[in-house]
Amino acid sequence: MAKKRLINLDFLKLPINRDTFQIKAKKVGLSPGTLVHVGKQKTEKPVITLIDYDPEHFETLADISVGQATSFKDSATVSWVNLSGIHDISLLEKFGKRFDIHPLALEDILNTQHRPKLEEFEGYSLIILKMLFFDDQSQAINTEQISLLLGPNYVISFQELEGDVFDGGRDRLQRSNGRIRHRGPDYLAYALIDSIVDSYFHILEKIGDRLVQLEEELISNP
């Protein structure tokens, strides 16, 4: 009898959070708009960064306070504020007060179990998506929730931890001749979403390459 071969198909698996139900139980009985972080803390210290720009101006600030980020809120430039680490409730409350973010929007941002969605609020839009990362070592697909808040002249991105798929966008912002430098915050949000979707295709390509490799192995050594 031929010996059975075991094939590692872990690369096809999406991570399953087995603590989902226990985590969601924290919200049972709470009124809508109550701020509770749903998910696991993925970074020790939240970090706020800011990129402020227009066709003639470009400025980037790292590890700043919410107050410093707010100082650009009413400027004529476009501001991209990024928060890496959303587990700090008090910090999210400060964002809510400084940028007039509705408690229901903050509640959604804190809930990392959300499905992708778009919701309109007075004065801004909230977009929730999933970023996917392929771990070459474990051959697994890891997910991270990202929330984009599109305001009149700013975009705020809320990430679970540092590291994302936006390096290409940051590079284009630094170049004064790029289209993105001459557009508004809506185009910035579009560019960020486009980067997220493009990353999906990179992962599909990796999976496709792995499937071809497995097929060749099965044909050559059935």
Image (tube, rainbow, N blue to C red):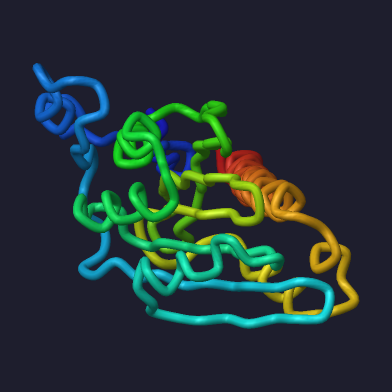
Lateral position of residue 172 relative to residue 165, left or right? right
Look at 25% across and 36% down and name the residue there.
Answer: 17
Residue 220 seen in this snapshot? no
Look at 87% across and 71% down and name the residue there.
Answer: 178
Q: How many marks?
A: 0
Residue 35: x percent and y percent? 21, 37
Look at 46% across and 69% down and name the residue there.
Answer: 69
Q: Nearer the viewer, residue 38 or 6?
A: 38
Look at 53% across and 46% down and name the residue there.
Answer: 148
Lateral position of residue 138 relative to residue 126, left or right? left
Quadrant of the rendered image containing residue 57: bottom right
Residue 29 seen in this snapshot? yes
Q: Indicate whether 90 appears above or below 124.
A: below
Q: Nearer the viewer, residue 171 or 207?
A: 171
Q: Quadrant of the C terminus?
A: top right
Q: Indicate whether 169 appears above or below 105.
A: below
Q: Quadrant of the N terminus?
A: top left
Residue 157: x percent and y percent? 50, 54
Residue 131: x percent and y percent? 51, 47
Quadrant of the rendered image containing residue 65: bottom left
Q: Indicate whether 42 appears above or below 104.
A: below
Q: Nearer the viewer, residue 66 or 74?
A: 74
Residue 137: x percent and y percent? 42, 63
